[in-house]
Amino acid sequence: SLPLLQAERKKNSLNLLEISEAELEEQFVRGDGPGGQATNKTNNCVVLKHIPSGIVVKCHQTRSVEKNRKIAREILQEKVDLFYKGEDSDVFKEKKASEKQKQEKKRRAKENLERKKLFKEMQQLDKE
């Protein structure tokens, strides 16, 4: 599955650590999950390992090996950046900001729901 940020991020805004191809170990394996014969007979799932950190990423989001390779590298780059930089990482900061926005949105929705309930109760009282 996609990490939280992959879908939301703006690729140019993040200052990620660069990973060289020499630091990567790449394998192609059979994917898992739904898909039947298309999944069971093709090795289009990409497993990438970053040798210095030991981080492993498995990507089987599309049927295309090339797209999976690209997506796996993006995910791995984010994870390696988070691993080395910790809380200073742009990935971490963006994830925190996203969580904060989500909480704010929930809070506003809850307030609106309370207002609607109050309004309906007042309407009921007016009718009686």
Image: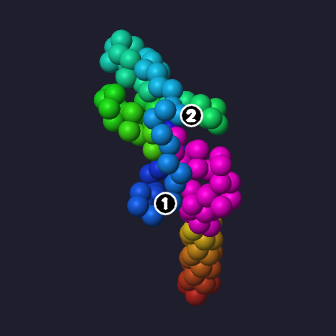
- 69 relative to 90 in the view: left or right: left
- 55 relative to 37 in the view: left or right: right
Query: Is residue 119 at least partly visible in the picture?
Result: yes
Whether residue 13 is situated above or below residue 18 in the rendered picture = below
Which residue lies at the image location 59% right of the left edge and 31% below the top edge? 51
Classed neighbour count for the residue bearing mark 1: other residues with Cα under 10 Å, few (<14), some (14–19), many (≥20): some
Magenta-colored stretch includes residue 77: yes
- Disc sitting over residue 50 in the figure: 2
- Disc sitting over residue 72 in the figure: none
Q: Locate residue 18, reporting x and y percent.
A: 50, 48
Classed neighbour count for the residue bearing mark 2: other residues with Cα under 10 Å, few (<14), some (14–19), many (≥20): many
Provide the residue designation for mark 1. 14
Q: Is mark 1 on a helix, strand or loop?
A: loop
- Judged by its main secondary structure, the magenta piece is helix
Query: Is residue 57 at least partly visible in the picture?
Result: no
Q: What element carries label 2?
A: strand
Which residue lies at the image location 65% right of the left edge and 54% below the top edge? 85
Q: Locate residue 76, reporting x and y percent.
A: 52, 40
Please tell me in which quadrant of the rendered image residue 96 appears.
Answer: bottom right
The magenta span reads: 76-100
The residue type indicated by label 2 comes to His
Q: Locate residue 55, reporting x and y percent.
A: 61, 35
Q: Locate residue 77, reporting x and y percent.
A: 51, 45
Whether residue 15 is situated above or below residue 35 in the rendered picture = below
- 10 relative to 77 in the view: left or right: left
